[in-house]
Image (cartoon, rainbow, N blue to C red):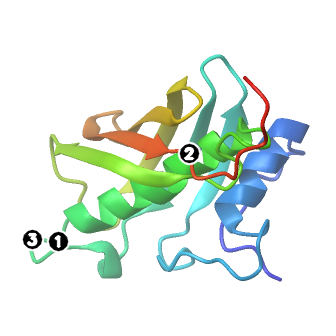
Amino acid sequence: MTPRIRAPSRKLEQFEELVYEYSNGTYDKDVKWDIDTRACNLRFESATRGPPARVSFLFKVSPGMCNLFGSLHGGCAATLIDNLSTTILMGVSKPGYFSIGGVSRNLRVTYLRPVPLDTEARLVCEVVQVGRRLAFLKAEISRVDNGDLCIVGEHEKVNTDPSTGRKL
């Protein structure tokens, strides 16, 4: 299977490889998210176990991602944040605790400034807190050319893993 998100040319560390596989959907052949990752040239940049655990992606705003004003559509930004922030959560998971990603409880996205068509952007997702039942993640989308912070996301997840009977 051809990866949907390109990896950097350097060799990935073990933790980065795990998060990269989650972000590409290669951990489960039957589950795919449907943003056209080739059109926006979505690329995995790096991941660190932390603390805080963090993952970074690069992408270029393509026409299919834009609203009528020619900038990144809010729904597209929210979808990117939803899906890609979950990859770092899965990277730090363990059996019984978010190993299948959980479900969104709340996704709050604040739009500070537009991300215009053809702009190279960076999406950084970070694990703020993980408990037995709930996780709190944050995400930021910024412009690569000038570092301007454009979009901020807060993502709450609920654990849906079957109980393992073990404590954290």
Q: Position of residue 136 (x, y in %)?
A: 44, 32
Residue at the disc numbered 2: 159
As helix, strand or loop, the secondary structure at mark 1 comes to loop
Please determine whether, in this image, residue 53 is positioned above or below residue 156. Answer: above
As helix, strand or loop, the secondary structure at mark 2 comes to loop
Report the quarter where the N terminus lies: bottom right
What amino acid does circle 2 point to?
Asn
Please determine whether, in this image, residue 122 is positioned above or below residue 37. Answer: above
Quarter of the view holding residue 75: bottom left
Real-space CA distance between mark 3 and mark 1, rounded to the nearest whole angstrom: 4 Å
Please determine whether, in this image, residue 138 is positioned above or below residue 70. Answer: above
Real-space CA distance between mark 2 and mark 1, rounded to the nearest whole angstrom: 37 Å
Which residue occupies the extreme top position in the image? 51
Report the quarter where the C terminus lies: top right
Q: Residue at 67% of width from left, 56% of height from top?
A: 100
Who is closer to the viewer here, 157 or 83? Answer: 157
- Total labels: the figure holds 3
Residue at the disc numbered 3: 69
What amino acid does circle 3 point to?
Phe
Real-space CA distance between mark 2 and mark 3, rounded to the nearest whole angstrom: 37 Å
Badge 3: how crowded within 10 Å, few (<14), some, or many (20+)?
Answer: few
Q: Residue at 9% of width from left, 71% of height from top?
A: 69
Please determine whether, in this image, residue 156 is positioned above or below residue 116. Answer: above
Q: Which mark is residue 70?
A: 1
As helix, strand or loop, the secondary structure at mark 3 comes to loop
